[in-house]
Amino acid sequence: MTKAVLPKDFLWGFATASYQIEGAPTEDGRGPSIWDEFCKIPSKIADGSSGDVACDSYHRTAEDIALLKSTGARAYRFSISWSRIIPIGGRNDPVNPAGIAFYKKFVDDLLAEGIVPLVTLFHWDLPDGLDKRYGGLLNKEEFVADYAHYARTMFEAMPKVKHWITFNEPWCSSILGYNVGVFAPGRTSDRTKSPVGDSSRECWIVGHNLLLAHATAVKIYREEFKTKDGGEIGITLNGDAVYPWDPEDPLDIEAAERKLEFSISWFADPIYYGRYPESMIQQLGERLPTFTPEEAALVQGSNDFYGMNHYTANYIRHKTSAPDPADFLGNLETLFTSKSGTSIGPETQSSWLRPNPQGFRDLLVWISKRYGNPKIYCTENGTSVKGENDLPREQILDDEFRAEYFRGYIDALAKAVSEDGVDVRGYMAWSLMDNFEWADGYETRFGVTFVDYEGGQKRYPKKSAKIIGPLFEALIKED
Ligand code: GBH
């Protein structure tokens, strides 16, 4: 018998994101996002695909809700396509009533089935109009004001939503969009990939602007909506677990901590403490923007909860050379094998992902300690499976590898709560269904549901869709 250790109102369910599932890019007045444009550039997406059709979820909301229902999910995390709401994006541009109506109805339909919506305002799909007009996320004054207006528009339209997420993984928007250049808008110093961009500077500016936009939206929610609507708002940060490559080497131990600071604390230290981590200030110098006293005060304290996306772990080895100007890791290497030859976990279809459930527990404890035991929602956790796309259908549906991943990670979560005292209130598996996996296209599948892209987007639940519910229902207290 599993011991019930999770609070009775624990929210578990599944997550998705607008551009990855919706399709219907020009329907009902939607404007283009930077991802629509990025996908048009040859060689940016592994299979040359785009989100043009994806899972066709824009036309299949009833089917998606029935699917959620069949898993027993208590909650669903999805994101809003900003360019459906304000097609060209800006605060003085027209708002599209059809876009608002679509998400309002979706929220009503979820609630009618007893499923709690967690709504992400921004999962990377910036209206292309804003990128073209003033450089999008690089433009502090304009971007912060336009995002604030968009956020307020959604708060006003959907008072029934009680859990708001301002940004999904600002690290990815900043680093992958403006340093490595593998995500939209694809800016980088690497001139083989892009004619424009400065990897040594732009990503840090973008990160700063995202923090200010987040904090501004939180201030608006707290001042104008929280009292009457009774909801909560926070940001979702990605973070991989770390272990020193050589546990005997103090420099590897330090580098492992620095890796967490460069990925997580870059955003979380300003939000909880009003300042950037010392390790980043030291390495980046004047390339890291500074907070004015007003900005610091605005950002500090701007989380009602900590949204945690988590997938994998790495061994960390320090570097001895001076940091490269384009370095964003903290002058270190990330590895899958330790000095003594231990592997961090088995391979998956994603080059960056190797399951290691203990890492989840250890990182939950690290976040909890560093940030004063905040209320945490795990807003994403999941895995791809090596070669899954090429397997016969019956084998895809019998996804024991993914099921085992969830068993391990959910057990780690339960232990973090019951044995380490971490305050976890929710868990969303990534993803409800196979979908557009960004630069990896459709070859890489993360769904607990198989989507038959050749067969009219029909959905077929895999084994993993069926095992998560019983695990949580056994772990959640009855009263
Ligand atoms: C999540 O990010 C996203 O929120 C979600 O949309 C996505 O579908 C899901 O992961 C699965 O990928 O460019 O090779 O160095 C997870 C965190 C952090 C994973 C950045 C990939 C870099 C890969 N991501 N990481 S690479």
Image (cartoon, rainbow, N blue to C red):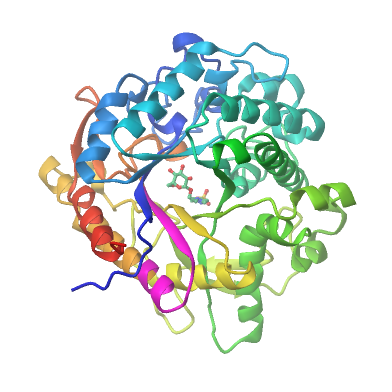
Question: Is 427 displayed left or right of 70 in the figure?
Answer: right
Question: Is 301 displayed left or right of 360 in the figure?
Answer: right
Residue 385, x across and y down, in percent: 29, 52
Residue 425, x across and y down, in percent: 44, 58
Observer-nearest of 422 and 59: 422
Question: Is 406 displayed left or right of 207 in the figure?
Answer: left
Give the residue drawn at x 29%, y 46%. Answer: 73
Residue 441, x across and y down, in percent: 40, 35
| Position of the C terminus by quadrant | bottom left
Considering every residue shown, the one lying at the far bottom of the view is: 248
Observer-nearest of 321 and 218: 218
Give the image quarter of residue 149.
top right
Give the residue drawn at x 24%, y 62%. Answer: 404
Viewer can see residue 356: no
Q: Can you say whether 135 is above or below 30 in the image?
A: below
Q: Is residue 444 magenta?
A: no
Q: Is residue 420 magenta?
A: yes
Residue 147, x across and y down, in percent: 68, 30
Question: Is 471 displayed left or right of 47 in the figure?
Answer: left
Where does the magenta region start and end? 413-429
Give the image quarter of residue 452.
top left
Give the residue drawn at x 66%, y 69%. Answer: 258
